[in-house]
C-alpha cells in the first residue's frame, strides 16, 4: 500500500536513495536492496558489503537515518576523503587502489552530530573492455541543436523500405491527428522551408507536451516563444525527409542509427549538455549561470585527463561555449581549440586525440537550430565527417552524431525511464511541473559512423547521452561519473569487430544548401 511522505516515520524520511522507493522501513534500490539501520542517527552502507571483494571502480550505495536533516555525506578510503556532497544518501562509483581497503561513509546533520560506518573490502582490477573495442582508438562525438527524431528521421522507415529493408522501425505516424492552439486538426506534414521559427523545449512545456505519454500537446506550447507566421503552432508537426537531408539519410542508412535514442532529461539545451559531459545536470532543469570557478562536478574530460587519455575539444564559431562553464576548463583549456585545428589534427593518426568533442556553431548558424538553415549546418557537418573518413585515423575511429534535445518538435514515442544519476532532486520553482530525473527527454536523431559499424544497422535499445559516456568509459577503462552512465548500455551493439564493414567509406551524396528558407512557409497546409 502506498504511504504518503507524511505517514512515514520521521526517522525514516531521510533513508531515500537514488532511484529508490520506500516500502515501510526498506530502501529498494535498482542495484541493491538494503534495510537501513533504524537507529537515529546512523549510516548504512548497502554496498559494498563488509568483507567482500569488488572491482574498481567500486559502486557505493549508502543511506542515512536521522531525526534531523542530514547536511552532507563524505566518503573516506583508508582515511582519505574521496567524496563530499550535500546529500542525504550516496550512489556513486569511486576508483580505488587494488588490495585491502577501509571504506568509511560519514554524515553530519543540522545539529552538528557526526556519525559514520566503516566496512573492510578487497579491491580487484577492473574488468577488461568489451572484446574488440580496442579496434576503436578515436571516439568523436558531436551534439547539434534542437531536433526531434520524428522531425528529422521520421521518414527513415520509408527510406529503408525503398532500398529493400523491411525491418521494424518506429517511424513518424503520418495519419496521427492532433489539435493546434486554435483547435484545428493537424497531421504531420513535410516542411516547405529549411528554416522555421523556434518552438520551446523547456521543462514545463516539454512535460505538458508529453501529457502522461499521450504525446499530443506539442502545438499547444508554441506560444511560449515569439512567432510571427504560425500563431497556431502547427510548425511543431513539420518534418524533413531525404529530399531535404539526403546526406544524413544515406549516412544513417549506410552506417548505424537508433529509433530509441533519447535526450537525457525532459527539458532544454543546458541541462542536457550537462548530462552529456557529467552524466547528470546536478539538479538543474534550465540554464543557470555557472559560478566564476565553473561547475565543479567531474566531467568525462576529467576522467580522461586522470587516465592519461588524449582528448581535445574543438569549437566551430568564436565561442568555446559549454566547456567554459566547468572548472575543467580552468585546468585543461590547453586542450580547447578552434575547429580549424581539427582538420589539421585528423591528418595524423598517431597524434589525433583519442576522444574528441566538437561543439556546435551557433553564432555562425551551423548548429541546425530551428531558426537557421538546416542544410547549411548539415553540409558543414558532412565536411567534418568527410575529413575523418579521408584520414589515416578512419580505420580506428567512431564518429557519433546526435542532437541535444527535441526542440519542442513533435515526436510520437514517449520518453524512456532510466536510473536517477544521483540523489540531487530537480531544482523546481513553485510554478514548475513536478518531475524527476528518472524520465528521459524526447527521442533525438543518432548516427554512429565507423568502419566497424554494422552496415544498415538500426538499434531498438533505450539509450540516452550517457551511453556515449559509457562507450568512452568502457573503451578507456574509466570510472563512471554517476549512477546513470554506470547503468547505461555501452553501445557496442552497433559494432561488428570481426571485420570492418566500411573500411573503404561508401559513396555518400552531397548535402544541398539551396533549399528555400522562409519563415512564411512554415505553417501546415491549409493554415
Image (cartoon, helix red, strand yellow):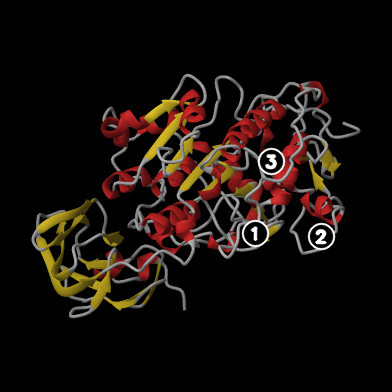
Q: Please give left or right for residue 379 compared with residue 452 in the image.
A: right
Mark 2 vs mark 3, CA separation in Å: 27 Å
Instruction: Identify the residue under disc 1.
Output: 454
**Above-or-below relation of 425 to 59:** above
Disc nearer the start of the sequence (1/3): 3
Label 2 environment density (alpha carbons within 10 Å; few <14, some 14–19, many ≥20): few
Front-most of 366 and 79? 366
Distance in Å between CA atoms under marks 1 and 2: 14 Å
Foreground label between 1 and 3 = 1
Mark toward the start of the polypeptide (2 vs 3) = 2
Expressed as whole percent of the image width and height from the top left, the position of residue 506 reads 71, 46
Q: Residue at x 82, y 30 (%)?
A: 523
Query: Which mark is drawn over residue 165?
Result: 2
> Looking at the picture, how far across and down is residue 22, in whole percent?
38, 72
The image quadrant of residue 238 is top right
Question: Position of 59 compared to 458: left or right?
Answer: left
Mark 3 surroundings: few (<14), some (14-19) or many (≥20) residues within 10 A? many
Residue at figure coordinates x 36%, y 65% from the top left: 6
Disc 2 is placed on an element classified as loop
Q: Say whether residue 526 is left or right of residue 274.
A: right
Residue sitting at x 45%, y 58%: 134
**Vertical arrangement, residue 318 with respect to residue 34, above or below:** above
CA separation, marks 1 and 3?
30 Å
Question: Which of the two discs, 1 and 2, labels the residue nearer the N terminus?
Answer: 2
Mark drawn on residue 409: 3
Q: Secondary structure at mark 1?
A: loop
Query: Residue 193 at x, y = what percent?
Result: 80, 27
Q: Secondary structure at mark 3?
A: loop
| Tag nearer the camera, 2 or 3 | 2
Residue 468 visible in rendering = yes
* Residue 10 drawn at (x, y percent): 27, 67
Amino acid at each position: 500500500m502506498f504511504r504518503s511522505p507524511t505517514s512515514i516515520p520521521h526517522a525514516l524520511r531521510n533513508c531515500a536513495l537514488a532511484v529508490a522507493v520506500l516500502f515501510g522501513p526498506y530502501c529498494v534500490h535498482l542495484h541493491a536492496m538494503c534495510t537501513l539501520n533504524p537507529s537515529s542517527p546512523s549510516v548504512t552502507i548497502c554496498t559494498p558489503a563488509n568483507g567482500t571483494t569488488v572491482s574498481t571502480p567500486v559502486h557505493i550505495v549508502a543511506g542515512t537515518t536521522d531525526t534531523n536533516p542530514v547536511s552532507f555525506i563524505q566518503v573516506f578510503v583508508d582515511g582519505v576523503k574521496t567524496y563530499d556532497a550535500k546529500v542525504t544518501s550516496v550512489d556513486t562509483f569511486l576508483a580505488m587502489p587494488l588490495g585491502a581497503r577501509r571504506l568509511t561513509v560519514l554524515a553530519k546533520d543540522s545539529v552538528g552530530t557526526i556519525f559514520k560506518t566503516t566496512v573492510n573490502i578487497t579491491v580487484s582490477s577492473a574488468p577488461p573492455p568489451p572484446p574488440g573495442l580496442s579496434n576503436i582508438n578515436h571516439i568523436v562525438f558531436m551534439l547539434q541543436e534542437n531536433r526531434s527524431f520524428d522531425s528529422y528521421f521520421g521518414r527513415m522507415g520509408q527510406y529503408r523500405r525503398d532500398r529493400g529493408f523491411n525491418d521494424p522501425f518506429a517511424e513518424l505516424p503520418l495519419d496521427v491527428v492532433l489539435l493546434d492552439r486554435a483547435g484545428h486538426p493537424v497531421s504531420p506534414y513535410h516542411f516547405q522551408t529549411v528554416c522555421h521559427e523556434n518552438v520551446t523545449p523547456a521543462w514545463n512545456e516539454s512535460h505538458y507536451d508529453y501529457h502522461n505519454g499521450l504525446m499530443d500537446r506539442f502545438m499547444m506550447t508554441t506560444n511560449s516563444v515569439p512567432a510571427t507566421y504560425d500563431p497556431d503552432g502547427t510548425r511543431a508537426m513539420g518534418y524533413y525527409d531525404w529530399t531535404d537531408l539526403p546526406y544524413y539519410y544515406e549516412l544513417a542508412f549506410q552506417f548505424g542509427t537508433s529509433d530509441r535514442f533519447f535526450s537525457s532529461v525532459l527539458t532544454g539545451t543546458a541541462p542536457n549538455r550537462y548530462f552529456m559531459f557529467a552524466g547528470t545536470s546536478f539538479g538543474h532543469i534550465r540554464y543557470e549561470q555557472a559560478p566564476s570557478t565553473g561547475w565543479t562536478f567531474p566531467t568525462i574530460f576529467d576522467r580522461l585527463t586522470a587516465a592519461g587519455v588524449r582528448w581535445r575539444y574543438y569549437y566551430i564559431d568564436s565561442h568555446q561555449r559549454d566547456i567554459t562553464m566547468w572548472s575543467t576548463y580552468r585546468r585543461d583549456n590547453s586542450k580547447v581549440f578552434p575547429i580549424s585545428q581539427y582538420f589539421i589534427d585528423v591528418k595524423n593518426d598517431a597524434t589525433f586525440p583519442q576522444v574528441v568533442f566538437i561543439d556546435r556553431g551557433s553564432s555562425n548558424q551551423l548548429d541546425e537550430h530551428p531558426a537557421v538553415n538546416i542544410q547549411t549546418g548539415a553540409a558543414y557537418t558532412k565536411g567534418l565527417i568527410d575529413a575523418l573518413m579521408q584520414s589515416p585515423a578512419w580505420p580506428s575511429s567512431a564518429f557519433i552524431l546526435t542532437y541535444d534535445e527535441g526542440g519542442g518538435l513533435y515526436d510520437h514515442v514517449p520518453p524512456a525511464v532510466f536510473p536517477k544519476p544521483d540523489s540531487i532532486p530537480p531544482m523546481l520553482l513553485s510554478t514548475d511541473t513536478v518531475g524527476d530525473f528518472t524520465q528521459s527527454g524526447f527521442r533525438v536523431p543518432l548516427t554512429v559512423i565507423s568502419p566497424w559499424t554494422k552496415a544498415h544497422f538500426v538499434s531498438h535499445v533505450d539509450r540516452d547521452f550517457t551511453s556515449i559516456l559509457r562507450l568512452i568509459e568502457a573503451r578507456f577503462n574509466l570510472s563512471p561519473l554517476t549512477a546513470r552512465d554506470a547503468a547505461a548500455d555501452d553501445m557496442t551493439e552497433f559494432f561488428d569487430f570481426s571485420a570492418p564493414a566500411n573500411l573503404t567509406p561508401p559513396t555518400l551524396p552531397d548535402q544541398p544548401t539551396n533549399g528555400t528558407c522562409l519563415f512564411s512557409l512554415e505553417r501546415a497546409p491549409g493554415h
